[in-house]
Image (cartoon, grey):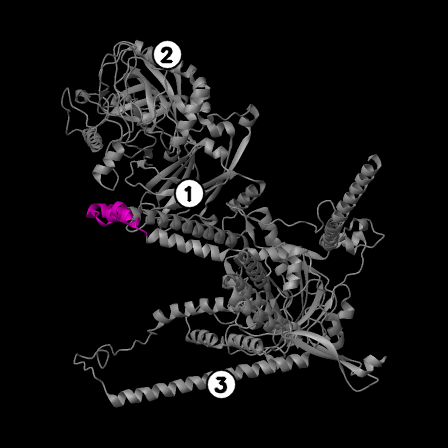
Amino acid sequence: SRSVDFTTDNETPMPPTNSASDRPPPRPGRGATPVVRFAQSEGGAVAGGAAVAGGGDDEGSVKPSVVAPAGNGAAAAAAANGPKKANGPKKAKSSRVMERETALQSARVWDVISPPPVNSKKGQFTPKRLQKYHRHRRISVEIHRVLPRIREEDEAKEDEDEAKEDDEGGDKAGLQGYEMCFVRVLVPATPAEAKAARKAAKAVGKVPKIAASKLAGKGSVREDDDSASIQSYVVGNGNGAMFDTSEDFSSSVPPTSDWIEKYKFPLSDVTLKRRVKNSCVMTTRLKRRGKAAAKVDEQTREIIFRTEKEAVAFCSALRDQGQMEEKREKNKLLAAMRSRQLSAEDMEGDVELLVEVVSASGLPIADLTSSDPIVKVFFRDAEIHRTKFVPRTLDPVWTVKTKSLFLMKATASELFMAEDGLVFIVEDHDTLRSNETLGGVIVPPRTLYDAKGERVEYPLQKIRGSCYEGGKLALRVRRATDYDKEFMKKLLADKNGKKRGGEGAMQHEKAVADAAKVKGGKGIMSTIVQKREKTVDGVKKYRVRPDPDPKRPEATAWMTEDEIEREALGESHHWLDIGSGNLGKVYLEIIKCEGLPQLDSGGFVGDKTDAFVNIVHEDCVVKTDVIDDCLSPRWMPWTKRAFVFHLMHTSSQIFIGVFDFDAGIGNDHDLIGRVSVDLSNLRPKTEYILDYSIYKTAKMSKREPHGKITIRLRLDYTDERQMVLTNLQPPPTIFVNVDDKKDFMCAYYTVSGKYNMEAYNLGTIHAYIEELMSLMEVTLYIQDAIINLLMWRGHSPFTIRAPCSPRDEDESGQKLEGFFQKCTKPVKMFFPTYSLNVFLVGIYLVEHPTLVPSFSFAWIAWVLIAVMNYRLNNPSPWNKCKSFRELFEMLVLGKSQVPPDNISRYENWKKSKEFMDKWKKRLEDVEKAGEKARQQALEDQQEYLREIEEIGETDVDISTQKGKGGIGGVVSSIDPFKGVLHPIQQYLGITCDWLRFTKNVIIWEECFFAFWICMGSLALAIIFLFFPWAFMMRWTSRLLVWGLFGPWMKLVDIYWYKTIENLSDEERSKRIEEVRKLRKKQTAKAAADARIARENAKKLKAMKCYMFGNFITKVPVLKFDRYRDIPLPSSSATPHHPGPQKLADLAMDEAGRNKTRVTGQQLVGDMIPALESVLTTEAPMGQPTAQPALLERSSPGAEVAKDSDITAMTTIGAIIVASGVLTFFGVPILVSSTQWVTSTVTLWVTSHFS
């Protein structure tokens, strides 16, 4: 065990007073009340506080005796003796972990003889007659006021609260502290211990003065003797010396002596059993610290006083103080609660706290270059938790894997009665020796009771007996929820770290485990034994894999090729509903693959590729069943092939990878190909059947298709307006965890492709450079736009009817009627809208140059809209994008008016093929022109070098040439350029990623981002249109000229600039130092923010690894692939209009019929983050269904259907327009009518009465 006594350097000694004072003592360092510190544990350095000496012939009289020097002895001894443990007297045995600052109120001391305790080893096995010494002791009964702990940063606030309570006459118990009674047993100090005590006092500037006699027995060692060698007296001003406040104590200086504490007991741990003349028998209890804190050592001690009167006085003192314990306990509770008022029921109610040891920073070095920090937590002097140590760091972060979390349960009264609340001790872990204490933190009960889970950093306080100081400890505390309790219960039961903590996590793990079960992958023996095809009545049939339909096994066990094809397009029987988003849902079904390569080696016996599909979307990873031995597999409706994903962001993609299943421990599943499905340009309420070619990579230039995959997909948006608004926030960073290495490799290959673009590879560098060179494709867009703009080529299509020879039928064979239709034909033309706009804007800007900023932003929006129109005019329906109008309607009206897609197979295939061939030819022409230009530049350079060689060198260098021959000519066998090229590769990768994203925004692949850039540019253009640029430029120029070039600048020179120029070196250094301090402060803040970010990342990683698996894959949200996967022309799209349903059927579907719900891996919250809550039904609160429009008219709740947002807004708009029209026309008419009536009446009255 060790000493854990806090020390400060602001203690002020004070002479003893003759009577106890009712006034509360001032805080340490703010007054003259003597501050005494108690030793709290065994071992260590000089006992904190003054050891009381005394004794007298009469009750109440105290002879001047000897007391050990006290105060900051441990700290001083540590400082004087070096960085290791301080040498000095042993600490008093006590069950308390850390001490509190106290102010002595009174002390009564007796000289006694104390034989060994009856139930101790020495008392049981050593006969009294054989005891060599009488064991001279001193025993004291002391009253101390325990001062409140106040953090330095809270002192000002506490002063304000104290003044406020004084003004209001409130309870001052919390500010004054509370009283405690202790019984201390003192033993004589050896000369070595006395010397160490004086050295410690000298180190802190408090040297006791020797006034009476010299220390005797310099060479002796204390053996519990009562001989004359200990009767030496030392009187001085030792800080914290104890004194008696009885009236007959006449000494003006508190006595000190070479006596140290042996034991210190609170009065509650002392029981007086009996008194026989001058002998008292009492029982003392000493709690064991550590994990065995529940055990208490009880010892029966006999205390022999010199006279019976002293024994009676001692018993009376214990009895009197015992009667006051109840009042002291009440005051102690008031001091802990301060101004808080709790009912009796609340005081007895349980308070269960969740505590997290977050991290530490700036810890001292305890080993050679670092430390191995570990944290121990104590409550009521008992260790209740211990973290694992974090090796070799001064800034440790404790996570769920290093036992950062624990629960603490106590009643409110127990919590507030605990003096120190929770005590956190930071130690350096050592395997071969005891741990070294680095510092400690105390969190008071009131802070624990009010904690809300916020992260709080506490400075580590120095521990008495330790030479280390500095550093901070970050903690979080809050009330434990039911989820926290369940999580911690599972966490404590999980000794091997293989189970998942918390009820929600356990349910997630079970659901994921059930969802991860796949059929198939039976191996080569099953291939050899099991028959795959057969002929029945001349019709060839194939075994349905992996299994037939459980509801009709006979009919679906063997099927023809056409039957399998039709059955595969049927509606899926069961869906896996997974994910954490709330923007919408994606319904995905894996239908089939075709043309897969043979990857298994047993093809001669029928062992072919065992295909399965792995899918990654945001925080979800799923996979289909395995179709054994098939190069064109079909997934049937009853197999695991249908998934419902929840959307978190509009740019999220669905990554699909096709793999060959390989059994065995060391074999990874082989990647066949992968594809990225872009959802941002797909429309809701549309059922897509999409065909994609699959490739092993989307980032390298040399890639070839390895088959084809067909999927069926449908989108449902929860709120279209929210879909648009989501893009105003940064996209989330998403990681997905898996529990198996094979699954991890599948997830990685599905997301990133076969090649690791982050690992150093010259081929990767070449691919990046090649991609940068290929970005000249963008110049074609620019070239096209400029040429079409300057040449007034049409962009906006329109149709007119032109004269033609009379005809009876049109080109499609329809019969024409009427002379006009027969003699004219429609002609499609294009109007040069953009050219006309640029011409008008140009001639206007020439006359009004102040509008250049406004038109510049308008030009940005115009460019993006022009590119959008270019995409929309593409003949291929799969190369189109969402329009600006469609997204604007989603934002303003909440719903787009664009109908669902209706695309037939091979629609506009010939035109789109011609368009793409033409575009490819243009790219090839550009590449050829670029290659030709490079060759010409190379020839020109060679010609220039020949000319230089003919001229000859004019500068002659006669120094020794280096790098040729032996000097520097050795080439390392290891790649010597990795240190240079690898960082370049990383920078190239970052550059290419962001160029790809920028390109996707410009060409409306990231249509939502492009829309917001257009909206922002148009808004700024309108704002700057009315901005007074001429006025601002004129007055800005005036202020600059008048302010910087006027004669008053001479005054600036005299009173300011020259003072800076004429600064002395010292003043200049001070100014530089101030700037440096400010910069260091800013750097420290930035470093702290970065440290907290890293800390949160480590904790989140550990929690996700614990809950979901140890292998992590980053899932990109934005599109960073070099090549975009476009659906093949054989794809199709049809509107999805489900028929009317009964309320019961629709409610069952919304509640999850035929679905298995699995939450995603998105965690929310601090300390113990929880999975995002998922509603059990899609229906809003108080409504029978989320889609009342799908109900039959006769079904209940069908009338609940309300007008759409568009209808409501149209109605409101019509009312506003009608009101405006009536106001515009009606008010003048009403005014005119009123004037006419008034004038008519006036004329009539005038004419009549005149």
Res 862 quadrant in image: bottom right
The residue at which mark 1 appears reads as 474
The residue at which mark 3 appears reads as 928
User: Which amino acid lies under the numbered mark 1 shown in the image of this protein?
Assistant: Ala
For the question of whether residue 657 can be seen, the reply is no
x then y, percent, for residue 304: 30, 16
User: Which amino acid lies under the numbered mark 2 shown in the image of this protein?
Assistant: Ser
Mainly helix, strand or loop, the magenta region?
helix
Q: Which mark is residue 1030?
A: none
| Span colored in magenta | 1046-1071
The answer for how far apart the CA atoms under marks 3 and 2 are is: 111 Å
At horizontal 53% and vertical 83% (from top left) the residue drawn is 924
Q: Nearer the viewer, mark 1 or mark 2?
A: 1
Q: Is residue 571 magenta?
A: no
User: Which amino acid lies under the numbered mark 3 shown in the image of this protein?
Assistant: Lys
The answer for how far apart the CA atoms under marks 1 and 3 are is: 63 Å
The residue at which mark 2 appears reads as 316
Q: Nearer the viewer, mark 1 or mark 3?
A: 3
x then y, percent, for residue 859: 54, 66
x then y, percent, for residue 959: 17, 79
Mark nearer the N terminus (1 vs 2): 2
Viewer-side residue, 489 vs 324: 324
Viewer-side residue, 370 vs 1228: 1228
Vertical placement of 457 versus 724: above or below? above
Residue most extreme to the front: 1250
x then y, percent, for residue 23: 36, 17
Vertical placement of 228 versus 84: above or below? above
Mark nearer the N terminus (1 vs 3): 1
Label 3 secondary element: helix
